[in-house]
Image: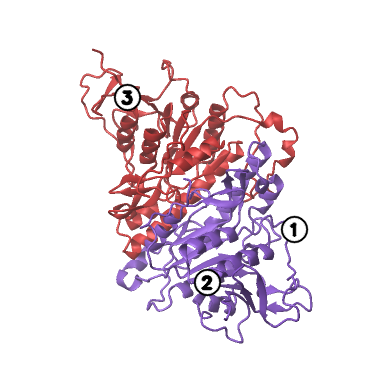
Chain colours: A red, B purple
């Protein structure tokens, strides 16, 4: 397992439409331990469904979570809905979902220092186990929320799927497995995870790094980051004068600059907010990772989850031009003219 | 991904001590949908811990599930227990845990016919998603129960870990990932799962088939099946005259016969009980799979979970001779004399 497992035939020529990041801050209650933001998650799932089946004729939602839910006495099995199967043959276009941890996993990871490695220490080893329990729990809940909206979602936990790192850089990943799931008609759902690192022993592999690796190898048409603010700002968005950066251009050398709104000093460093318990970096990691994706010629949209703006981004409406009333940040590769 | 992913260096020469199957009937309430048998699971987890750390000096249990539990207000984080880390350096010998589905997954699988394949049918596709949600939910709860006993357990869901089949036979499996997790000090926890099949589209891969494949390639010292009866009987164990078969010998051609107790007609077919909702076969599959493992020279013990007999089997006490007061079934390879 010394490479990324991509056989020549494993990944079809057909390109993947979209890789979407469900930011931890958007789908969990960040300040409440292991609490999902149910309303946001439900809206996000419904918008994902709309974006995935664009052009399909059937609007009937057939739930695929036939499990008991806490507080609900019976299971919701939709087998009776399958009378006329032809009507239900909805084509889902190829999306990959990756989610962050939010208030799941971070507590366990930061208490034990899993991201710093050192598996021979009992505390780190216990924290590794505790972190994986917490993030796989969140993964299951997200897969269920998507399945309730009729999305054929399949959890693919990075540790189990052969993702590992070398000094925090991706060293191996079973991308062929992701492609195989997609081509079988499923929507793979990955997440930030604790993984083995061949230099450090272990570390945390963030959802943002996973997205970059997937984008690099699977070349989606576009990438969407759903977050809890309207996009990238020039200073913390809680400040009264914060300006939303609508378009960021990435140069061939990977450096980036704001092109809309025009600013006096384009090299001015954008200030960033990082929540104290976010062990994998906040907006700064996101911009750096996004810039690396944009450099591949893939547009990246950073947008507030569960808004009309996120639906437009997910649907691919922004690919040709950005409407004036759209709120969010586009990060694009800028080919220099002449 | 056309083979089983075993690199020459991936699996160390050092052999794995034990592969243990937690039977679905032993750890769930078989007749109640998605209900865990908490008492049994707790006892099984505690016995597994005892068996794994035999010879270690430390008996202190350091819980590794730091998540919220339903009905429990706070999380149980044991970071404070890590003051003297040296004391906590418990060596766990190499065990692999595989569990069945019991009352998880079977309902979803049988309603939709996932085991028969046909992913292009909406009902089968939905059932595939619903089955995976149910069995990964059980996997998470088992990983948590083991972690609460201080076992560094790691869920490795077969679908995510590259297991797939061809006409229901294992076609690929990331065994190197399992070995890597083991050698990093973790206890991998696999389970019966819905997987892709390159002939049928999809099918159910049972925990018993997973165990045989793991045993074939990783050569454990012994294999234990924990179930809800004392072992294999000559007729359904609910019948008054049922006789527990204490020892079954497997010939080189794979056929098997009862050697203890001695029976008049050794070729008499052992009757088997299969619960109606068990889509992956019951005791018959178990004996067939067990016979194939025994043929490799690996002893197989079928024993009632959460009893003194299961602890003795897990501890490896039966490897040289079977005590007269031990209740269970041993399945062994019989080398013909002369």
How crowded pointer 2 is (Cα within 10 Å; few <14, some 14-19, many 20+) is rated as some
From the top left corner, tell me how far across and down residue B43 is, in percent: 56, 72
Q: Mark 3 — on which chain does it sit?
A: A
- Lateral position of residue A105 relative to residue B285, left or right: left
What whole-number distance in Å separates the C-alpha atoms at marks 3 and 2? 71 Å
Reading the chain from its start, which is encountered first: label 2 or label 1?
1
Q: Residue at x 26, y 32 (%)?
A: A271
Q: Residue at x 36, y 45 (%)?
A: A3
Pick the residue in front: A262 or A18: A18
The disc label shown at residue B297, or none: 2
Q: Residue at x 42, y 57 (%)?
A: A130
From the top left corner, tell me how far across and down residue B182 is, in percent: 41, 62
What whole-number distance in Å separates the C-alpha atoms at marks 2 and 1? 33 Å
Q: Do residues under tags 3 and 2 come within 8 Å of each other at their CB atoms? A: no
How crowded pointer 3 is (Cα within 10 Å; few <14, some 14-19, many 20+) is rated as some
Pick the residue in front: B213 or B195: B213
The disc label shown at residue B276, or none: 1
* Residue indicated by mark 3: A243
Pick the residue in front: A11 or A188: A11
Count of numbered tags: 3
From the top left corner, tell me how far across and down residue A45 is, in percent: 54, 35
Q: Do residues under tags 1 and 3 come within 8 Å of each other at their CB atoms? A: no
Q: Does dot 1 land on a helix, a strand or a loop? A: loop
């Amino acid at each position: 397992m010394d490479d990324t497992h991509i056989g020549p035939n494993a990944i079809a020529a057909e390109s993947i439409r979209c890789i979407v990041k469900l930011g931890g801050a958007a789908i969990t209650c960040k300040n409440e331990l292991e609490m999902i933001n149910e309303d946001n998650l439900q809206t996000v799932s419904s918008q994902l469904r709309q974006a995935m089946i664009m052009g399909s004729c059937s609007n009937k939602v057939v739930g695929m979570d036939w499990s008991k839910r806490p507080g609900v006495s019976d299971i919701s099995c939709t087998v009776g809905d399958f009378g006329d199967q032809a009507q239900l043959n909805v084509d889902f276009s190829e999306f990959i979902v990756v989610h962050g941890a939010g208030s799941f996993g971070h507590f366990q990871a930061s208490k034990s220092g899993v991201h710093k490695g050192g598996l021979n220490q009992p505390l780190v080893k216990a924290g590794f186990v505790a972190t994986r329990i917490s993030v796989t729990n969140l993964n299951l809940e997200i897969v269920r929320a998507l399945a309730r909206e009729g999305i054929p979602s399949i959890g693919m936990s990075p540790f189990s799927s052969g993702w590992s790192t070398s000094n925090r850089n991706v060293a191996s990943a079973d991308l062929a497995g992701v492609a195989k799931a997609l081509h079988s008609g499923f929507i793979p759902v990955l997440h930030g995870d604790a993984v083995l690192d061949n230099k450090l022993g272990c570390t945390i592999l963030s959802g943002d790094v996973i997205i970059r690796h997937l984008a690099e190898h699977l070349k989606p048409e576009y990438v969407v980051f759903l977050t809890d603010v309207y996009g990238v700002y020039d200073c913390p968005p809680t400040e009264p004068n914060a300006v939303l950066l609508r378009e960021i251009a990435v140069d061939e050398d990977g450096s980036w600059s704001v092109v809309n709104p025009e600013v006096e000093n384009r090299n001015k460093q954008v200030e960033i907010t990082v929540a104290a318990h976010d062990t994998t970096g906040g907006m700064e990691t996101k911009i750096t990772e996004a810039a690396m994706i944009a450099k591949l010629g893939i547009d990246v949209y950073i947008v507030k989850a569960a808004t009309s703006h996120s639906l437009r981004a997910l649907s691919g409406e922004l690919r040709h031009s950005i409407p004036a009333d759209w709120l969010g940040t586009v990060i694009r590769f800028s080919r220099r003219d002449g």
